[in-house]
Image: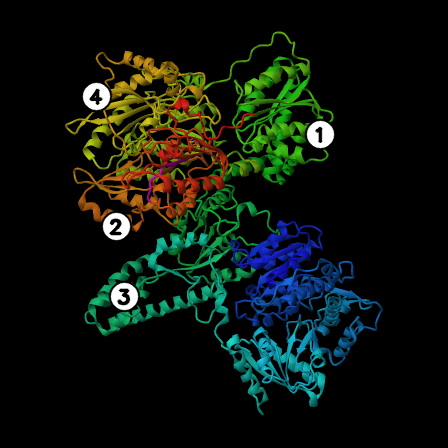
Amino acid sequence: MGSISTAAQAVARIAYFSSDVILSVQPSLQVDSQFYKQFKRLRESNARSIVSKGVPEVWAIRYNEDPLLSAFHPLHSGSIVSITTASSILLTSIPHLYHLANHPIVIHVALEPSPFPDFSVVSSIRQCGFAFLHSETLQEAQDIALTAHALALKSGKGVIHFFDPTNSKHDDPISIEDIDVVKKVLDLDGTRVSHTTTAGPSTLYAEIGRLATITEERVERPLERETVALSTAISPQSKEAFNTGSDDSSVGSSGRDSSSDLHVASSSATTVDAASVRPVNAGDIFDWTAHIWGLLSKTVGRSYRAIEYTGAEDAKFAIFIFGSTGVFVDVFADPNRANEFEGIGIVTARLYRPWIGGQISRMIPSSIERIAVLEQVRSTTRWGPSFLDLLSSLTRSGGAASVPRLVGYRLGYVESSTAVQALRGIFQNLKSPSPIQNLEIGSHRDFTSQISLERPQIENAYTKILNQLFGDRLYIANQLGSQHAGISATTAASPEYGFGSLIARMEHRERFIHEVGEISKCGNFATEIPKNWLSRWVSHARNTSISNSLAPDVIARLTMDGSKAAKQLLDAKKLFFKESQWLIGSDAWAYDLGNSGVHHVLASGADVNMLIIDSQPYSERLAGDPTRRKKDIGLYAMNFGNAYVASVAVYGSYTQVLQAMAEADLFEGPSVVVAYLPYNKENDSALTVLQETKKAVDLGYWPLYRWNPGNDDGSEPKFSLDSERIKRELEEFLRRDNQMTQLMKRDPDFSSHLAGSYGTEVRVLQKRKAKDTYEKLLEGLFGAPLTILFASDNGNAQDIAKRLGNRGRARGLKTMVMAMDDYPIEDLATEENVVFVTSTAGQGEFPQNGRAFWEVVRTSGDLDLSSINYSVFGLGDSHYWPRKEDKIYYNKPSKDLDARISFLGGGKLTDIGLGDDQDPDAFQTGYAEWEPRLWQSLGVDKVEGVLEEPPPLTNEDIKLQSNYLRGTIAEGLLDESTGAISASDQQLTKFHGTYMQDDRDLRDERKAQGLEPAYSFMIRCRLPGGVASPSQWLQMDAISGAHGNETMKLTTRQTFQFHGVVKGKLRSAMRAINKALMTTIAACGDVNRNVMCSSLPEFSAYHREVYAISQRISDHLLPSTAAYYEIWLKDDEDNKVQVGGDAVQDYEPLYGTTYLPRKFKITIAIPPHNDTDVYAHDIGLIAIKGHDGHLEGFNVLAGGGMGVTHNNKKTYPRTGSMLGFVPTNQAHVVCEKIMLVQRDHGDRKNRKHARLKYTIDDMGLDVFKSKVEDLLPEGLRFAAARPFKFISNIDTFGWQQDEKGLNHFTFFIENGRVEDTANFPMRTGLRELAKLGKGEFRLTGNQHLTLSNIEDGDLPVVKSLMTQYKLGNTSFTGLRLSSSACVAFPTCGLAMAESERYLPILITKLESTLEENGLAQESIVMRMTGCPNGCARPWLAEVAFVGKAYGAYNMYLGGGYHGQRLNKLYRSSIKEDEILEIMKGLLKRYALERKGDGETPERFGDWCIRAGVIKETTEGKAFHEEVAEEEADE
Ligand code: SF4
């Protein structure tokens, strides 16, 4: 049998077994309370509650979320509820306590603070109607907890069990509860009270119309005050007690101090049923408690009484303690003190409320003459409640002669070392002829100050922004941790307190303004100058910006003046500045208990700013208790009309937060900024907060807006809706709403369809309509019906379904093809023939557009499919999950569906067909075998004359038919009904430098709401060599703010990329980029892309020469179509240029009508830096310096490339092969000819085999080289490659000086993301630097940034800005500095796993290992991508992670440190735990085993090979050979 060592443990276990629902109230969700730990353990072991017979629900609720409010919902639904909490929440919960008291709820209260708890909190709430039980020892905690639950069940009323956890800290462990005893005591089958609804407002119980009542066994005479108590089944003792006077007894609910409740109860009873039903009263509680204790005594042998006395039976003196008894008990139990304290008893109240006064005199010996009453009393009260309880009870119960004399003491903190002394003092006074009342015992420091409140770290995001914005001017009235004399932390954090203190502060300044006004008129200054300044200041003192700008001048003049009057004012010089005054609160203020403070501020009209942080996660908004009434503070405040109101989200729009806070500060009147920061636990990662925020903002749950009633003149709108997407949807809604209104007038029936939510009713209608239309279309056809339903993520399953549909139709079948989720599932049972085609998503999941369908099929118990015939075809990859145990994921959705449909009665047309990516023809192999079987089963396999359907549209067709990249892009941009463009235009816009994407963080949620995905566009600039002027930087920054998502991505191809540009803003963004003298043409697509060039900060002149060549190549290879200009740039009036049609025929001399087979990439590296990864591109040029120090020419590499498909061994990464040396002025020609050979020989059938690397490997390097040379001008041939040496492929951070003495600083921009966060306003800082107009901005191939060409004279101002914005920090671990990641989630459609958002987190988790092993400064090149497309060039890293599925990565090792060698697969599909374990092990070994002196240590990638961890990859074709983990082949 286990044992229990803490009171919280004992109590939690009893609560767990005795409840359906438990609310665990705790200061934060990050750290489990003592109670909660137990609950968790019990839940994990699947322990069942005795009352519910199931595993009880346990809800963790933060103390500041109005926690007791959560009890009502489960109580109203009939659940048995208990609460575990610390005592700090009790006072603020008083309103709820009164209501809860009439429910069978138990609240276990651990008294705080430790080690000297405050019992006065309990006496303060003693009248709330609960019964109160007190336990002291560990064993008592268990027994009394059980008593509390049994009593609550029996009485139907609330019971509070309170205890001091430290009191029993040193008790010996006890046995865990005996479940049989618990069952017996709880007596679940015993009689219970009933609850009656009454209308009478006579008690606070009755306020909610609920009253615990008891049915009398026999009808008594009409109920009268005294007789009620006696008529219950009360014990002889208590009956006797009540006989002595009803005022001795109280249930304590009336709000008056003791003794009147019996009366209240009886008068209420008359309203219920005077004959047989009456409210539960104190006597009942007493009786039942005694009964429960009787049972306990019988079963476990431990006895308890309402009032307990220990000590001699002939004692003359006693102490009554309302507080922790531990230290006193220890003294009395000490045999050495036996003599000193002989003849003294201790009295405690085990049942503290209802107070059964008559029990006192029964329980204490009649010999007692004097009682010392020790209790914690707040200094506002002269007599303590216990003193008054005893006084009233003893005087009435005994008669004058025998009444013991009471002497009250104020009990402070008594430590064990001073307990004897304290007791001596007590008894000396007690025994003296005239004892002093209210003597203080122990120390009386402020016991409330120890209750600690902490604002979760995560919430600091907003305070940091306030600090950034207002600096020294910021004053937070209720700042946690600041000193407020005599005020508890809880009170100091409340809006009421903060508001009061702000008012006092404002009044203080008003007095100062008045004083300055007076002095400015008649002050005795040395000169007249201060007076003028002072009077100017006074007239603007309430205006934030003017008074603050005048303040320094005024102070300077006063300082200069030096007179006494000036000095006097200078004593309070801070008051010359107007503060930005804020109150900061949580969404707890949106509940009733906190709302009054908000109301005060608004109603006052005072110039106070409130920042209210709401942390409820979006995904939990519906899961919560529907009866919790959280008010929409924003709406509430706007209704006031006089307040500035903004709704912001720091992870939604940082700029909008800044704007709102600045506007709130300037607004003269109350301002309310409600700020969203959703989290489940205080230690949630920023990524979780970001994803929750995005959902909430995107779907309108948390709209971003600003309401400024001060904008009266009409120049600015009063209300600004800042949420971009809902703005568009709102407009659309209003437009539609307008149409609907018209429609409803004409057709009233239609309106009922609109009553439901858009996401349900309308969606159902849409499905129905789509199917009906389809059926109509099929009406004219003969033949058997065939319904084909698909679920598809990447389009393959959809293509198969459509093709199958076409072929079926050609065979005379009536085919209908739909996505599973678009199909009205209620029709399924009525179908004749159904074919399901599904691919496999994630870890064996259904694709997005089949999930809802599958959910119904999977869970529906009454779906009868016995009349349908069906077959399933599935697509999967048998090698996707290499481990044996993961094989079940292969084609899981199709197999599951097949089994389920069969289970539901479906008859098979033919067995399931499985397409496997690993088959020779990929899924086609399985399909070719399955389809004929299907036709055969339908009897249409022998149909004659079936026409071959046209081949599917390929990228080559799209290019060919596009009229030089026009397609229907222009028309698509004008279509406002969707945020998307057509599929073929999506391919074509790539050539223009923009992709359509959708926000994958929002996909599921938007689909669930019946909305199209959150489409937006990525725009990529073309920026040869990555060099931008400061003004271009500023323009790029402005574009990201005005058109994009307020961030810029500096890419691995040294250019700017913008994300989140919605269709409506696409054209203006393109125009803005071109206005900045940049372009986006050919930044993506099957053309030559941005040409890269080493950033080379240390040699400016040489860099210029090489950079010029990158520009020349870029210009030389630009497509020449005019479509770009027509679509994006022409003026609206420019009618001369035709966009659509083919009137204007372009000519593409280099590319022709079909451009290149695939993308084409060129880079230049300047040794010794390979910072552009020269081996990874179709063409890599290695700059060769001549003896004269100038650029002489280039060694040319060809056939590098990164893209791979997982598990497809026909695809592989490749490093470029050396062709030889060419002179500088011919470099662009050589590049052109290489590109032309690829244009004509590249594979245009299979895009996975279309890159130059495969062309070269297929034809052989020599053949390829000769083909290029055939095209070169006569006399130009590849010469022998010149010697060169690379030392690294990473950037050199920090300051460097070049040969001309110019300065260059390379910033660390983690993964190239330029953005502002609360911790690091990087974007703002770089913008400020650009505003200086100095030097140039060079984007590096590692996604960092160099501020170049800064002259010495400009250094101070540059450095000062860098310090101000923390931009100069490059002291990160070598691993972090050498890392890079691609974008991946949420925007990249190909991403299988996180990359940019995850790599920094992973590195953080490795950094302690690096430190421990002395590797913190070592550069190890680590890269991550979200898919094998390889945008961050992972295959060249020493260690790389490539996304396989969400949260799972393939790990590669052994890349060359300067990018010269490919790495190799080490592990497949591993998750974070494994990654960390492997990496930590390898890093430890590397630290120990690496060779080399300090200067040139053996690199990690090299070590991995030497140590035999991984085999070396010698060339691209050998990439899949001898991998460390062969994928299981079964
Ligand atoms: S590597 Fe893959 S996931 Fe990453 S950005 Fe490129 S395509 Fe997207």
Q: In the picture shown, does residue 423 fall above or below 1502?
A: below
Extreme-right residue of the structure:
218
Q: Which residue is mark 4?
A: 1225
- Pointer 2: residues within 10 angstroms few (<14), some, or many (20+)? some
Lower position in the chain sequence, tag 3 or tag 4:
3
Q: What x and y, as percent, mark residue 207?
A: 67, 64
Q: From mark 3 to mark 2, how far is it between C-alphas?
A: 36 Å
Q: Is residue 795 visible?
A: yes
Lower position in the chain sequence, tag 2 or tag 1:
1
Q: Which residue is mark 3?
A: 535
Residue 903's disc number: 1
| Element type at mark 3 | helix
Give, as a single range, the part of the protein colored magenta: 1417-1425
| Element type at mark 2 | helix
Q: Which residue is mark 2?
A: 1360
Q: Are marks 4 and 1 in contact (CB under 8 Å)?
A: no
Task: Name the amino acid type tagged 4.
Answer: Asn
Task: Name the amino acid type tagged 3.
Answer: Ser
| Labels 3, 4: front one | 4
Q: Tell me the residue at 34%/16% (across/down).
A: 1261
Task: Name the amino acid type tagged 1.
Answer: Phe
Q: From mark 2 to mark 4, how far is it between C-alphas?
A: 43 Å
Q: What x and y, as percent, mark residue 1127?
A: 38, 25
Q: Are marks 2 and 1 in contact (CB under 8 Å)?
A: no
Closer to us: 684 or 1469: 1469
Q: Are marks 3 and 4 in contact (CB under 8 Å)?
A: no
| Element type at mark 1 | helix
Q: What x and y, as percent, mark residue 830?
A: 71, 26
Q: Is residue 432 left or right of residue 452?
A: right
